[in-house]
Image (spheres, grey):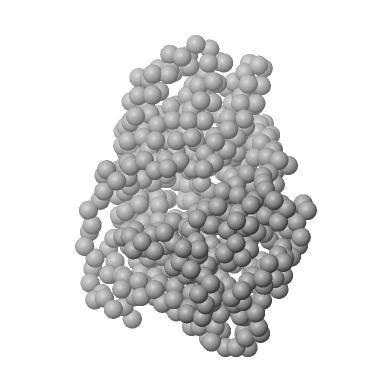
Amino acid sequence: MSSATPTPTRVRRLPVVGPLRLGRPSDVWFKPALSVVAAVAAPSLLLMTLGRLDLAPYTMAGALCALYAHNRPYAARAKVLAWVILGMLGGLAVALVSASLTRNAVVLVTVGALLAAVQKVVCDATRVGPPAHVILTFVSSATLFVPQTLGQVPGHLALAAAAGAWAWLVDMAPAPLRPHGPERRATAQALNAAATYAETARGGEEGAGGARSAAYAAVHAAWQTLLAVRDRPSTTRRALERLVVRAEVALAAPADADPARLRAWARAVRGTGRIPRTGDPRREDEGLRLNGADAGVDGADARPDGANPRRTDSGARLGGDGPRRDDDPLRERDELVGVAAERAVAPPPLWSRLGPLAPVAVRSALGCALAGYVSLALGADRPYWALVTAASLYQANITLTWSRAVQRVVGNLVGVLLFAAVTPVAQLGPLALVLCILACNFGAEALIGRNYWLGSVCVTPLALLVTELPGYQPTGELVTGRVVDTLVGALVGFVAALAVTNRRAGRRVERALTAVDRAREHAARLAADPMSTPAALEAARRGLAAAVVDLRATADAAAGEWWQRALPQERVVLAEQAAHRTLAATVRRQGLLPDPGTTSTYTHTEGASP
């Protein structure tokens, strides 16, 4: 039961300035930016050479798939991209057939709204993104209002499919050069996040709670990346898994962690160099010599067991079976046995993840449809602009949806000014138009990581320039129509989000609390049982860590919803604190940390990161 009185929550003030603050750019912002430029450039320049630039919107539909799956291992990326391309072609096919069968704008808006809702739910359930459903909705909605005949549909779909295949090749091109690049980046981010939390926790800073949540999320994301490929892991991937285990240990016992060592490991993981060993933490001079023969493994000539002849003096015990070397092959096998067990478990079926997304689906369908209808009532020629604006708003809760609305409006308004500035250049000729489109593609992906509104400054002129591929149009009409449709889509879309309440959010918090309690009790029982196997301990620890991450995400999402009873915030905090204590006890029981007070070898300054 909740410890809070179940009274309605008060409507909180919605932020205006906060959503516009700029953040740090993504570490790999240039990858999607360069990929989309390469994917769009080749078919567009080819069509320009053939004098058929009017067909470029269809090839661009397939080329934009190059924006997806850059955070996934290449084996998983190949499959995800294939599904994204098929999903794009499916939505495009529905739009083209609908456009060829009717010119009734109300019917077309309705079809576009239903497609947007389906695309939103499927992308959320499968965690495809960024950019998730927005690109798919833009493609399908825009083509709904392009005059078609049934005879033209197969050819247009073939163009999109060919461009999609080219985008697949572009996204997979780095694989031979950096076959483990995504896994390395995810591991480095987890290590850096764990180091940041260890520093803030040790210094007693106010941001320790936020740093802890961010670190757990980064570690969880690293495991998702490493476990995305279900086949037998390579030596390199196993070495990365050992590093993520060390990040988890640092989260469980931040006072014993060495942030400098975690950051050194993170620096070493980036690039194509050797992966550092997770050896004796007290041998700083040996453990950080990353260029030496004993400093790391690189997946080609590494020993499978990663054994290190150096012996840990403290000899942390596992199940009372005597001291073990810090890099003993059995120790490393014990650490990863739970990972292997998780890899063998099939993911939950898609249908089980669709239920909680029902309110989001209704919001998307209703908001997009109403935005399109209002735009039509105001005499708009392109109501899909309002539809896409509404579709882009819907986030995990009302507060985040409001923030996205602010970002979308500001970005679009600045973007139309940029469009007005570049239009004279774009109208110099077909080559100038294609180059402007490529520049906007690059700018959008380069800037959107800092803030959505900043990326929208380039997305808006991109969308407007695409409308000029079949032929130049009056700039004033395009600017006016885009401004009106942006305001209509943002306003109507947000009102629809307010109208469709998500009262299940509170119940999901209760279920997440129950899951954490059960996982904590299970882990505590195993930690207290001297007969517990390494596999059971590791699986219990990983299960508890995942439950904590899910609880925080669920609680944060529910906290931004309106019109619901007060959330059990106190229970959430207490459950997190108890879970973190159990995680610390579990890693000590596994022998990943010494028992407190049993040795003076691990010092605060030298750290105890295994």
Q: Quadrant of the N terminus?
A: bottom left
Left or right of 550: which side holds 2?
left
Q: Position of residue 280 (x, y in %)?
A: 61, 65
Q: Nearer the viewer, residue 123 or 170?
A: 170
**Residue at 62%, 80% in the rendered image:** 318
Q: Nearer the viewer, residue 463 or 448?
A: 448
Q: Residue furthest top?
A: 428
**Residue at 56%, 48% in the rendered image:** 267
Question: Against 59, is 71 above or below?
Answer: below
**Residue at 59%, 20% in the rendered image:** 53
Residue 369 appears anywhere in the view = no
Q: Position of residue 258 (x, y in %)?
A: 50, 61
Q: Quadrant of the C terminus?
A: bottom right
**Residue at 53%, 72% in the rendered image:** 601
Q: Position of residue 550 (x, y in %)?
A: 46, 66
Residue 446 appears anywhere in the view = yes
Q: Position of residue 243 (x, y in %)?
A: 60, 60
Left or right of 498: which side holds 266?
right
Q: Nearer the viewer, residue 429 or 335?
A: 335
Q: Nearer the viewer, residue 405 or 314?
A: 314
Question: Against 530, is 269 above or below?
Answer: above
